[in-house]
Amino acid sequence: QKEVEQNSGPLSVPEGAIASLNCTYSDRGSQSFFWYRQYSGKSPELIMFIYSNGDKEDGRFTAQLNKASQYVSLLIRDSQPSDSATYLCAVKEVNFGNEKLTFGTGTRLTIIP
Amino acid sequence: EPEVTQTPSHQVTQMGQEVILRCVPISNHLYFYWYRQILGQKVEFLVSFYNNEISEKSEIFDDQFSVERPDGSNFTLKIRSTKLEDSAMYFCASRERWGGEETQYFGPGTRLLVL
């Protein structure tokens, strides 16, 4: 069973600071990684995806991937109260051409005004 | 912006009853998925569907579950005889053709409560 691990939190960060969310995965062959944001009672909403080692920036968000360490992270700069949500790390598994997402349990982030 | 839609938003049913959850995927998407999330737990894959047949299913997707694409737009999940442990949020997702954008876009979900 392929696993995706996240610290469940809660992680509390002051408004304006950088929030750092981490995720590790068990399948060394995984190629595609996604960060979703989920507000309470709502569906996962895509923030970013990353396929290559290194950093990928999109506005206030930066995803970092290190395939050798099987580690992916999400940095949120200038954190806002509206960033308070659960952040889900998802890894795409491909099996004989069929794909699915395996999710971590999510990290609950609270931005303190 | 195109989005995945789901109906109903909430469904309450008695144990043993059949329920059908409906989804309209994004119109040019070809791959469809159902996931579920039990309250307080992680999002879990149920089934994937392509070219009018199931591509892959998880251990959760037993004989009580079925999926169908009855027409060109709807994608349904049927639970034949609901159990208490089927209570969860059910999310439909869709993605583009193979080789296109890999992202799976999620619908708003149906909250199913089995009493």
Image (spheres, coloured by chain):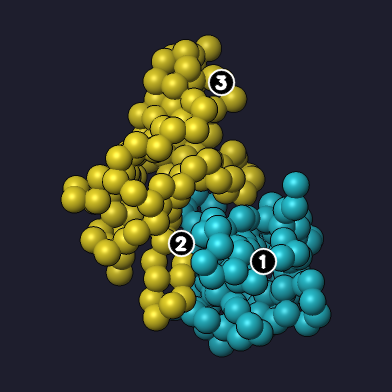
Q: Is residue A61 above or below residue B67?
A: above
What type is the residue that disc 2 sits on?
A: Leu
Left or right relative to B93: residue A12:
left
Disc 3 to disc 1, C-alpha distance: 34 Å
Question: Looking at this view, is B50 or A13 the one in front?
Answer: B50
What is the x, y in percent for residue B99? 52, 66
Disc number for residue B29: 1
Chain B palette colour: cyan
User: In whole angstroms, how far apart are the C-alphas of marks 1 and 2?
Assistant: 17 Å
Q: Which residue is rendered at x = 62% and y = 49% of the image?
A: A43
Instruction: Name the residue located 56 percent from the left edge and 62 percent from the top edge.
Output: B100
Query: In this orientation, which residue lies closer to the viewer: A108 or B94?
Result: B94
Residue pointed to by mark 2: A101
Estimate the x, y position of residue A22 in percent, counting from the top left.
Answer: 32, 39
Q: Quadrant of residue A57?
A: top left
- Mark number displayed over residue B2: none
In the picture shown, does residue B49 fall above or below A29? below
Report which colour depicts chain A. Answer: yellow
